[in-house]
């Protein structure tokens, strides 16, 4: 009987160890690979969020609310122009990107985790920009409050979704990715509501949202099908991924010009915008 009890304890310990090892492996995928990739676009957007604080506060100090609104609207549009293609690109090319960057450490769960988590990019970058605008308006506590509320939402969803592996792609490690998306989206909504109440932004929805979304959708299709086609010819996934990303970037920049998403004033607010605008008008890609 004692021998049987010892065997049962050994089997139980082995089961617990296996569960622990699996949990550690999955957490390593999420924190070591996915979170690193999701954090990269934030580095591109941080300059706009940082520059927005003195720009907005300076304009308001002069009593120029129109300029403050213009700068905030421009920054939000620019943030979306950065966030949307990054999110969609990582979503449609999730598996090729992971194979390119982590060829010796591929895990079957990683691609879907990246596809789910890619939408966090949109909300995270928007929170950067909205936080900068709110700080420029003197509402320094709002970004922290929205972040705290988002953290509470994430905690509740983590406790609900992660332990439940019976709900398929909504539970387990995928639940952790979903909770991050919902939490960052919650924080963004709070920031956006407060900012709109404070400034009453009169953004052109077609120019700021509809056109960028359409351009991003076309770019995503180009990225996916160009990778599929090139890889069928070359049978070299890594090289095909690099070429597909390059094609997607070029096509997206052309789509921005085709849809006239940026106007003359927008170009002047960009770094080296005057030179870019002069060059584009010279080669007749933009009307003067």
Image (spheres, rainbow, N blue to C red):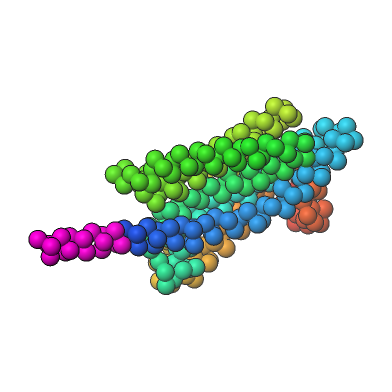
Q: Is residue 2 magenta?
A: yes
Q: 268 or 34: which is nearer to us? A: 34
Q: Residue 274's spot in the image, x, y percent?
A: 82, 53
Q: Tell me the residue at 82%/32% (across/down).
A: 65
Q: Quadrant of the N terminus?
A: bottom left
Image side of residue 66 versus residue 247, left or right = right
The answer to whether residue 125 is above or below residue 33 is above
Q: How many marks?
A: 0
Q: Tell me the residue at 22%/64% (across/down).
A: 10
Q: 104 or 154: which is nearer to us? A: 154
The answer to whether residue 248 is above or below residue 71 is below
**One can see residue 11 in this view:** no
**One can see residue 91 in this view:** yes
Q: Which residues are magenta?
A: 1-18
- Give the quarter of the image for residue 105: bottom left
Q: Residue 197's spot in the image, x, y percent?
A: 70, 27
Q: Is residue 31 magenta?
A: no
Image side of residue 27 versus residue 9, left or right = right
Q: 4 or 106: which is nearer to us? A: 4
Q: 164 or 33: which is nearer to us? A: 164
Farthest right residue in view: 62
Q: Residue 92's spot in the image, x, y percent?
A: 46, 54
- Give the quarter of the image for residue 275: bottom right
Q: Tell me the residue at 51%/51% (across/down).
A: 118
Farthest left residue in view: 1
Farthest front residue in view: 2
Q: Residue 221's spot in the image, x, y percent?
A: 48, 51
Q: Main secondary structure of the magenta part?
A: helix
């Amino acid at each position: 009987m004692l021998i049987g009890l010892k065997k049962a304890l050994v089997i139980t310990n082995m089961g617990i160890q296996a569960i622990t090892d699996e949990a550690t492996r999955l957490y390593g995928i999420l924190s070591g690979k996915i979170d690193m990739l999701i954090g990269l676009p934030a580095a591109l957007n941080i300059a706009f969020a940082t520059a927005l604080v003195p720009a907005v506060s300076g304009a308001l100090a002069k009593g120029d609310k129109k300029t403050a609104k213009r700068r905030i609207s421009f920054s939000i549009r620019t943030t979306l122009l950065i966030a949307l293609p990054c999110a969609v690109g990582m979503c449609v090319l999730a598996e090729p990107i992971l194979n390119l960057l982590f060829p010796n450490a591929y895990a079957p769960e990683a691609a879907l985790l990246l596809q789910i988590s890619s939408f966090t990019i949109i909300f995270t970058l928007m929170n950067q920009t909205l936080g900068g605008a709110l700080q420029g308006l003197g509402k320094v506590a709002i970004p922290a409050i929205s972040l705290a509320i988002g953290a509470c939402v994430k905690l509740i969803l983590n406790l609900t979704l992660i332990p439940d592996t019976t709900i398929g792609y909504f539970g387990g490690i995928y639940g952790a990715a979903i909770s991050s998306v919902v939490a960052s989206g919650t924080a963004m909504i709070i920031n956006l509501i407060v900012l709109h109440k404070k400034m009453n932004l009169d953004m052109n929805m077609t120019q700021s949202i509809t056109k960028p979304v359409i351009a991003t959708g076309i770019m995503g299709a180009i990225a996916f099908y160009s990778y599929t086609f090139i890889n069928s010819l070359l049978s070299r996934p890594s090289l095909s991924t690099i070429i597909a990303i390059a094609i997607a970037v070029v096509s997206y920049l052309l789509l921005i010009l085709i849809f006239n998403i940026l106007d003359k004033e927008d170009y002047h607010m960009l770094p080296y915008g005057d030179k870019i605008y002069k060059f584009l008008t010279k080669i007749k890609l933009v009307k003067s």
